[in-house]
């Protein structure tokens, strides 16, 4: 699958709209995308080249707008497992990719395209036109699937477009109704 074959913005927009309604307060959606590119050797004298990037997203919809937080790694050894960070309750700084009521998917699309471009440049290929180039993107295997998290915003820096948050806990699917707006608990 080439990188441009998966319409990532539409896929993520659909997942977010289905799983996380507006006015969700401190409830967020967390997932990690792995984007990779490779050039496979044609002869025994050449070596395969492989570059991977991980892009972590936290989607928040505390009111009518959607906030897209992004963190990217181009060295897979640098990514801190999500569960360890949550258990420790550490402050994490994310880049604010978008903060808007309707154009929020642009922040996701822009972040993915930046990672794709860095991979293409690192491999030294002519983008999608190079026949020896193979690309792939998917939810990261171990921590990538979308999951609900409770967050606490610690600092919002508009000038630097960063947000410091703490993910206070992962919310199991069977308990998410307790945190969503307009649920049975709200009507009691």
Image (tube, rainbow, N blue to C red):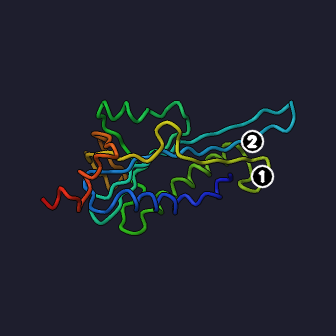
Question: Which residue occupies the extreme left position in the image?
Answer: 188
- Residue, x 68% and y 51% (percent of image)? 1
Which quadrant is home to the C terminus?
A: bottom left
Residue 39 marker: 2
Residue 183 pos. (x, y %): 23, 59
Q: Determine whether, in the image, residue 163 is placed left or right of residue 135.
A: left
In depth, the one of 56 and 6 nearer the eye is 6
Residue at 72 percent of width and 37 percent of height:
49
Neighbor class of circle 1 (other Cα within 10 Å; few <14, some 14-19, many 20+) is few
Above or below, 69 relative to 86: below
Pointer 2 and pointer 1: residues touching (CB < 8 Å)? yes
Q: Secondary structure at mark 2?
A: strand
Q: Which quadrant of the structure image shows residue 127?
A: bottom right
Percent x, y for residue 20? 35, 57
Label 1 element class: loop
Residue plotted at (31% across, 52% down): 157
Residue hosting label 1: 130
> Is the residue marked by circle 2 packed among few (<14), some (14-19), or many (20+) residues within 10 Å?
some
Quadrant in the picture for residue 172: top left
In-image side of 147 versus 44 (left or right): left
Q: Position of residue 100 (x, y in %)?
A: 36, 65
Q: Position of residue 141 (x, y in %)?
A: 53, 38
Q: CA distance from mark 2 to mark 1?
A: 9 Å
């Amino acid at each position: 699958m080439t990188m441009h074959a998966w319409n990532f913005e539409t896929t993520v927009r659909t997942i977010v709209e289905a799983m996380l309604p507006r006015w969700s307060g401190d409830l967020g959606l967390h997932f990690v995308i792995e984007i990779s590119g490779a050039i496979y050797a044609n002869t025994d004298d050449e070596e395969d080249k492989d570059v991977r990037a991980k892009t972590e997203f936290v989607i928040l919809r505390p009111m009518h707008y959607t906030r897209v937080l992004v963190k990217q790694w181009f060295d897979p050894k640098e990514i801190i497992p999500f569960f360890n960070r949550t258990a420790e309750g550490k402050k994490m700084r994310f880049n604010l990719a978008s903060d808007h009521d309707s154009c929020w998917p642009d922040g996701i699309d822009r972040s993915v395209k930046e990672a794709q471009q860095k991979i293409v440049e690192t491999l030294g290929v002519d983008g999608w036109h190079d026949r020896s180039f193979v690309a792939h993107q998917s939810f990261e295997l171990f921590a990538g699937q979308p999951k609900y998290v409770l967050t606490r915003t610690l600092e919002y820096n508009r000038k630097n477009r960063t947000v410091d948050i703490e993910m206070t806990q992962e919310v199991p699917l069977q308990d998410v109704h307790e945190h969503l707006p307009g649920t049975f608990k709200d009507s009691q």
